[in-house]
Amino acid sequence: MFKYYKNSLLILLSDQTHLERYKSYNLSYTNNIRELYVNDQNLTNIPFIPTLEILECINNQLTSLPSMPLLKELLCIGNELTSLPSMLLLKELCCSHNKLVILHNMPLLKKLYCCHNKLESLHDMPLLKELGCPKNQLTSIPNMPLLKELWCDKNQLTSLPNMPLLKVLWCSNNQLTSLPVMPLLKILHCDNNQLASLPNMPLLKVLHCDNNQLVILPDMPLLKELWCDENIQLTPHLQTCLRN
């Protein structure tokens, strides 16, 4: 399926017939392509398309991607990728369920979802607002001062950076012994860590902190849901679940 948008070309490959038409098409035509959607096509490679700005290639058999110097949005979930090319203009990346061991620096990135990979570290991402990186091998999270939502459960984290704008944090199943001050936080899942205390979180509404080493909880006047089982030293009357 080929669709024109002004001077650019959008290609949607929705079945194997369209895929074969695309493969046999003159690749010089790709100089006009701005968006390419090739999900669920058993692709093993994608051609170099110098004008490409958006690429969706979910659930294929890709082991690598070509250089894409103008790319701004990439969704490549469910492939066999071990690395990605340098993409300095990229703003949104969803690369979960691959075999990535490293990501290149992407200074303009605002959203990153990279769960179920083999990442051991991440670059600084000063503009990032959303990060989902569960089930990797991360030992630290870089400074991200604009971050608002973070999912980093099931890693090897021992600490977290300052995140003054954070509103949602899922950090269960790590090795955390403390948490930074997060004055805007509303949702916290920190089960299965080594936390002995929690910072003040005056706006918190949901707290799951099972299986830690908590002795006392801070004042949380807006709290509506609390799970705090398996904290042996915590005051007995707090060993309950509150639901709204």
Image (tube, rainbow, N blue to C red):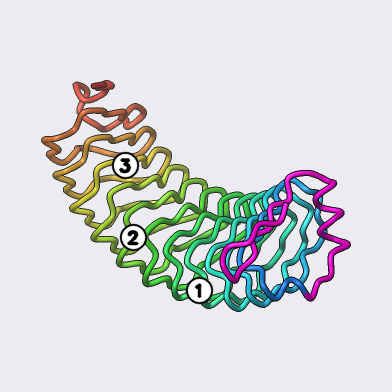
Q: Could you tell me which residue is drawn at 37 percent across and 42 percent down? A: 190
Residue 22 lies, in percent from the top left, at: 81, 59
Instruction: Name the residue that disc number 3 marks.
Output: 188
Structural distance between the alpha carbons of marks 3 and 2? 15 Å
Q: Return the x and y of residue 46 as percentages of the image width and height.
A: 77, 64
Of 124 and 215, the residue lying toward us: 124
- Considering only order in the chain, which callout, 1 or 2, is on the residue closer to the N terminus? 1
Which residue type does callout 2 highlight? Answer: Leu
Q: Is residue 20 left or right of residue 83?
A: right
Instruction: Identify the image quadrant of the C terminus.
Output: top left
Rounded to the nearest angstrom, the CA distance separating label 3 from label 1 is 28 Å
Image disc number at residue 147:
2
Magenta segment includes 64: no
The residue tagged with tag 3: helix, strand or loop?
Answer: strand
Q: Amino acid at mark 1?
A: Met
The numbered mark, 3 or 2, whose residue comes first in the sequence reads: 2
Residue span colored magenta: 1-28
**Residue at numbered disc 1:** 106
Answer whether labels 2 and 1 touch (C-beta < 8 Å): no
Question: Horizontal placement of 99 versus 234: left or right?
Answer: right
Q: Position of residue 81 (x, y in %)?
A: 72, 60
